[in-house]
Structure formats: structure tokens, C-alpha cells
Image (spheres, rainbow, N blue to C red):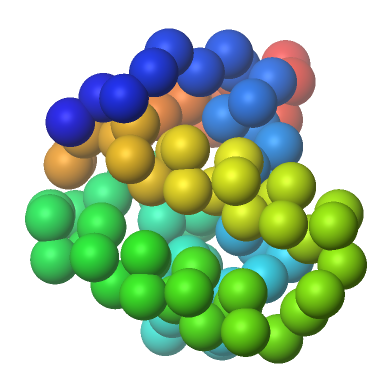
Amino acid sequence: MKTQLLSQDDIRQAINDMFDWHGGQSSAFYSFASTRKLVDEKHRQRCLDELNICRNFTTFVEDFEQFARIEALIMYAKPMVEVISYQDWIGS
């Protein structure tokens, strides 16, 4: 279900954005950001649902730029495949 190629910088930033917006440790965003992968298509849908909830809480353009990055990553990810390794994510 890849819609576009994302650079490591795009992926890194989207993951950090998800950590900024997650709804707690049991949230779909937190799970994806922590493991850097989706579990399955239901997890993808829960991430998209959480994204839509977040969109309802802001009117700032900067937030919508974050949401666009997050959505691109959600749609890019393949279930059970890390979108970026831990070492690449932390920049080592």
C-alpha cells in the first residue's frame, strides 16, 4: 500500500510527530511510533482514526503539516515491517 517513497528524514520526523500527538501508551500512534511498524491493516485504520481525532483539536497550519507527514507515513508503512531501524531513527 505504498503511496510514495519517504526519505529517512521524513520518516524520522513523522515518528517524532506521532510521539507529540499520541493519546497515551495504549494509543495506535504510540504503538506505531514505539515499534516503528504497523501490526496489521486494523492498526493502520486505528492510526488514521486517531489522526482524524487530532485534526479536530487544532487550527494551526504547523499542526496540519505534521498531520500530512503522519498520514504519509501511515499509508507508506507495510504491516509488520519497520519503516526505519532504531539506529537510523536515532541518527546513529
Q: How many marks?
A: 0
Residue ID at (66%, 62%): 19
Query: Residue 40's image quarter?
Result: bottom left
Farthest left residue?
A: 41
Asked if residue 87 lies left or right of residue 27, the reply is: right
Query: Looking at this view, is 61 or 90 the one in front?
Result: 61
Q: Quadrant of the C terminus?
A: top right
Residue drawn at the location 33% of the way across and 40% of the way down: 75
Q: Quadrant of the N terminus?
A: top left
| x, y percent for residue 56 | 62, 84
- Residue 12: quadrant of the picture: top right
Q: In the shown orientation, is residue 14 left or right of residue 58?
A: left
Residue 15 appears in the rendering: no
Q: Position of residue 41 (x, y in %)?
A: 12, 55
Give above or below for 5 relative to 66: above
> What x and y, as percent, mark residue 11?
57, 30
Q: Residue at x 42, y 84 (%)?
A: 26
Q: Quadrant of residue 21?
A: bottom right
Horizontal relation, residue 21 to residue 58: left or right: left
Identify which residue is drawn at 14% across, 66% down.
42
Q: Position of residue 76 (x, y in %)?
A: 34, 31
Q: Is residue 53 at all visible to an observer of this figure?
A: yes
89 relative to 63, above or below: above
